[in-house]
């Protein structure tokens, strides 16, 4: 993160921005970790330790990847909203 400090107010802004960045990064890591745990729980592990994603999940996730938020089902939109709630208190006005 590039930040130039010219006065005391810049120092406060820098600290606030850095703190916010770290809080958001922490939440993002937890979100990613939760997702990976979920994906791993749905996969089958072969003899070499590779994880194999079942074809029905590949099909479902590829559909979700190629679908814009506006065109998702209400259930899938709610899942995205639930993820946003992890950091909503940090970013709401």
Image: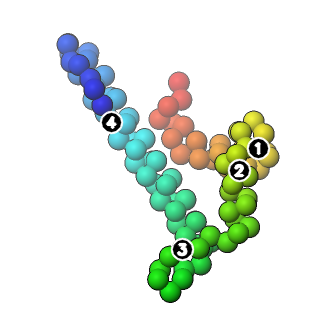
Dot 1 or dot 4, earlier in sequence: 4
Q: Which residue is mark 1?
A: 72
User: In the picture provided, is 16 more to the left or to the right than 74?
Assistant: left
Dot 2 or dot 3, earlier in sequence: 3
Q: Position of residue 91 (x, y in %)?
A: 50, 31
Dot 1 or dot 2, earlier in sequence: 2
Q: Position of residue 9 (x, y in %)?
A: 26, 15
What whole-number distance in Å separates the C-alpha atoms at marks 3 and 1?
27 Å
What whole-number distance in Å separates the C-alpha atoms at marks 1 and 4?
33 Å
Tell me what residue is drawn at x 51 percent, y 53 percent: 31
Nearest to the eye among marks 1 and 4: give it. Answer: 1
In which quarter of the view is residue 21 placed?
Answer: top left
Q: Which residue is mark 4?
A: 19
What whole-number distance in Å separates the C-alpha atoms at marks 1 and 2?
8 Å
Marks 4,2: beta carbons within 8 A: no
Residue 87 drawn above or below residue 56: above
Q: Which residue is mark 2?
A: 64
Residue 1 drawn above or below residue 65: above
């Amino acid at each position: 993160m590039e930040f130039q400090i010219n006065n005391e107010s810049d120092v406060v802004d820098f600290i606030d921005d850095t703190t916010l960045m770290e809080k958001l990064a922490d939440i993002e890591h937890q979100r990613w970790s939760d997702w990976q745990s979920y994906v791993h729980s749905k996969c089958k592990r072969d003899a070499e330790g590779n994880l194999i994603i079942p074809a029905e999940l590949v099909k479902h996730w590829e559909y979700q990847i190629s679908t814009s938020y506006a065109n998702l089902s209400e259930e899938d939109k709610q899942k995205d909203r639930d993820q946003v709630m992890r950091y909503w208190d940090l970013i709401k006005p």
